Image (tube, rainbow, N blue to C red):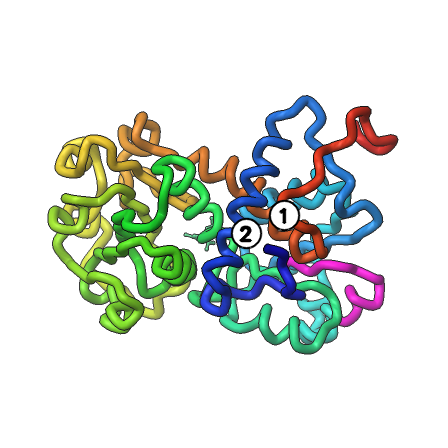
């Protein structure tokens, strides 16, 4: 199946077949990443602008590297050093980037809906790299890619997402993707952070950690997103860790083959203990590796590429390292 969308704005509006197309294409790109020459010419001559108005380590570098591996030119826009600080609107900033003939704008913004707004007013391809507490589609795609790779299937897989669900765009995008692909999702955390509305998306909700992890194939942990919480949502971090933190003893309550995931950044000693983060059941760094392949697939498909992608040239391209 080919991809016919101009943008990637969210998971909610995607069909299950579109999700599978991205996953299959990413699988081919992962193989490219393991070759001596990791670059393919698919986006040669195209310009990708990373418009990150919120902090990011993994996602920004991953998109930058993905664009470079596809031979695009990449510009990183830093909000602190830009005219956004001089009162320019997001729309005007983005229009100026378009006037420079950018082909893709990858946007991260604290306002939910900012990527959808840009996609309406601009001709360029827009990719959502996280908008407020709304969605983070490429994170969900790399998460389900990792689950499918590790467990061989998504249909019927039991996935528990644990932590700050209310403020998490990662949780929202994961729930959409997992439900569309037939996985069973349990959400767990303090009652203030696990909104009942998620039950309408077909999730099981619980505030009991033991119950949440007992039959899980995947335990996906989330950071407490203090920067988005308007007031304290639970008595204190120590209590959160005592009730919901995952350490080795807690992990022993899960199935022996249950895997631990986390989108990062991890807060060691809060939602995850170092023993677990660095242990053999953790696939946290593999998620990062897979994120690169998934983002290459997204840029490739939006650019009109057909899955699976072409093999890289047998000899290094003139501009390859
Ligand atoms: C997440 C984000 O920014 O949405 N991180 C990420 O992109 N890997 C999660 C978070 O900030 O906790």
| Residue 85 position in % (x across, y down) | 67, 67
Quickly name the residue at label 2: 21
Q: Image point 17% across, 44% down: which residue? A: 215
Mark 2 surroundings: few (<14), some (14-19) or many (≥20) residues within 10 A: many
Badge 1 marks a residue whose secondary structure is loop
| Residue 229 position in % (x across, y down) | 35, 65
Report whether residue 126 is seen. yes
Return the residue found at the far right: 318
Instruction: First in sequence, mark 2 or 1: give its number.
Output: 2
Quickly name the residue at label 1: 307
In the picture provided, is 255 more to the left or to the right than 135? left
Query: Which quadrant holds the N terminus?
Result: bottom right
In the picture provided, is 29 more to the left or to the right than 221? right
Q: Ligand 1 within 8 A of label 2's CB?
A: no
Tell me whether the residue at label 2 lies in contact with that at label 1, contact meaning CB atoms closer than 8 angstroms: yes
Which quadrant would residue 99 be assigned to in this image? Answer: bottom right
Q: Image point 19% across, 31% down: which residue? A: 256
| Front residue (pair 134, 238) | 134
Return the residue found at the far front: 1
In the picture provided, is 313 more to the left or to the right than 28? right
| Residue 241 position in % (x across, y down) | 20, 46
Q: Image point 38% across, 42% down: which residue? A: 147
| Residue 11 position in % (x across, y down) | 48, 63
Mark 1 surroundings: few (<14), some (14-19) or many (≥20) residues within 10 A: some
Report whether residue 57 is seen. no
| Front residue (pair 145, 310) | 310
Magenta segment boundaries in residue numbering: 95-106
Q: Image point 38% across, 35% down: which residue? A: 150
Above or below, comparing residue 319 to residue 42 in the picture: above
């Amino acid at each position: 199946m080919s991809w016919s969308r101009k943008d990637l704005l969210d998971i909610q509006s995607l069909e299950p077949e579109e999700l599978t197309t991205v996953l299959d294409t990413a699988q081919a790109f992962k193989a490219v990443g393991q070759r001596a020459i990791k670059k393919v010419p698919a986006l040669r001559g195209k310009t990708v602008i990373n418009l990150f108005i919120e902090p990011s380590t993994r996602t920004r570098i991953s998109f930058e590297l993905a664009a470079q591996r596809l031979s695009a030119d990449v510009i990183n826009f830093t909000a602190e050093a830009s005219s956004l600080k001089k009162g320019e609107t997001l729309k005007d900033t983005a229009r100026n980037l378009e006037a420079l003939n950018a082909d893709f704008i990858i946007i991260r913004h604290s306002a939910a809906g900012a990527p959808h707004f840009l996609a309406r007013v601009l001709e360029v391809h827009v990719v959502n790299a996280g908008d407020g507490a709304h969605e983070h589609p490429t994170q969900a795609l790399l998460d389900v890619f990792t689950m499918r790779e590790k467990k061989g299937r998504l249909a019927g897989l039991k996935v528990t997402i644990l932590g700050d669900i209310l403020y998490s765009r990662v949780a929202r995008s994961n729930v959409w993707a997992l439900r569309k692909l037939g996985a069973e999702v349990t959400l767990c955390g303090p009652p203030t952070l696990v909104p009942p509305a998620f039950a309408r998306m077909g999730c099981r909700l619980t505030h009991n950690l033991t119950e949440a992890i007992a039959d899980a194939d995947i335990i996906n942990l989330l950071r407490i997103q203090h920067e988005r919480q308007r007031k304290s949502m639970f008595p204190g971090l120590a209590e959160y860790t005592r009730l919901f933190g995952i350490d080795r003893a807690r992990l022993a309550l899960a199935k022996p083959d249950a895997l631990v995931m986390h989108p990062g950044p991890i807060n060691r000693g809060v939602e995850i203990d170092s023993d677990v983060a660095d242990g053999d059941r953790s696939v946290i760094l593999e998620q990062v590796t897979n994120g690169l392949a998934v983002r290459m697939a997204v840029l490739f498909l939006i650019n009109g590429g057909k899955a699976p992608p072409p093999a890289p040239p047998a000899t290094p391209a003139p501009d390859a390292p």
